[in-house]
Image (cartoon, rainbow, N blue to C red):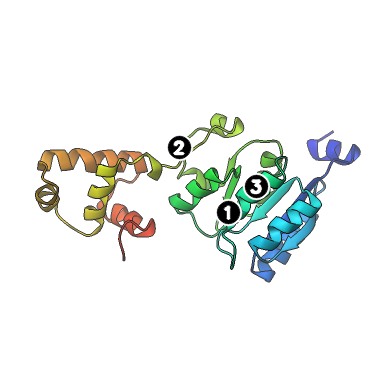
Amino acid sequence: MTVCCRLMAIGKQITVLVADDHALIRSALVAVLNGTEDIRVIAEAANAADAVELAHKHSPSVVILDVEMPGVDAFHAATHIRQLRPNTAIMFLTASDHDRFIEQALKSGALGYVVKSDNPDSIPTAIRAVARGEQYFSPTAADRVRGSSADMRKGRVVGTRGAALSEREIEVLRYVGKGFAKKQIAEMLGISVKTVDKHVTSVMEKLDIHDRVELALYAVREGFINA
């Protein structure tokens, strides 16, 4: 008997609250989840404040939160839900793969982070994983975190690649993002060109980015500089 069938047999469905301010996305997600044997959506919310209230009322197994909803900050809501319902797992479903958002999700106590552009089949898989107390990151998000699959199963992923950068490396990254040459960066920071080279190499290794253009795009995307 499969895991799904065993869950149905003993009446232990995974109950889910879905919070997304886009009604079309929310309804499509509800339809997909209710089409599975082991997952049932018991509440919907269009904003984070309502998600907190409904999570407290219904005590779902899993709460799915969009990152960018109007009103109350979604990460603050996640923290509040965890305080009210410690046995409820949180996962984020969002269009954004920014390191800073993934970092905030981890700090809020969320176990899952799924990027909407990834395969939608990953959503039920993510729900089952976080309901078991495991971490789950869809492929795009997994590329941004530091940790193996084994770390995720044990809930040990605590940070993103970006969080590994030192203050000096962030300074260098900002100047690279602004298009300054290594010699110019060295003069502005009062260090040698060789030291700048070492910092750039270290940043690229930590971020798994090996092209200066991509590095500049990362700096803009993560808010280190303005576009």
Given this view, does label 2 or label 3 mark the residue nearer the observer? 3
Q: Is residue 164 visible?
A: yes
Determine the residue positioned at 59% across, 67% down.
71
For numbered disc 1, what is the local secondary structure?
helix
Given this view, does label 1 or label 3 mark the residue nearer the observer? 1
Q: Earlier in the sequence, mark 1 or mark 3?
A: 1
Residue furthest bottom as drawn:
23
Q: Are marks 2 and 3 in contact (CB under 8 Å)?
A: no
Name the residue that disc number 1 marks.
Answer: 76
Quadrant (top left, top right, bottom left, bottom right) of the C terminus: bottom left
Q: Nearer the viewer, residue 210 or 10?
A: 10
Q: Are marks 1 and 3 in contact (CB under 8 Å)?
A: no
What label sits on residue 146 in the rendered view? Answer: 2
Looking at the image, residue 139 lies above or below residue 50: above
Q: Position of residue 178 (x, y in %)?
A: 23, 60
Amino acid under disc 1: His
For numbered disc 3, what is the local secondary structure?
strand
Amino acid under disc 2: Arg
What label sits on residue 90 in the rendered view? Answer: 3
Amino acid under disc 3: Ile
- 3D distance between C-alphas at marks 1 and 2: 23 Å
Determine the residue positioned at 30% across, 43% down.
204
Q: Position of residue 89 (x, y in %)?
A: 68, 44
- Res 33 quadrant in image: bottom right
- 3D distance between C-alphas at marks 1 and 3: 12 Å
Residue 208 placement, left or right of 20: left
Residue 223 placement, left or right of 31: left
State how many labels appear: 3
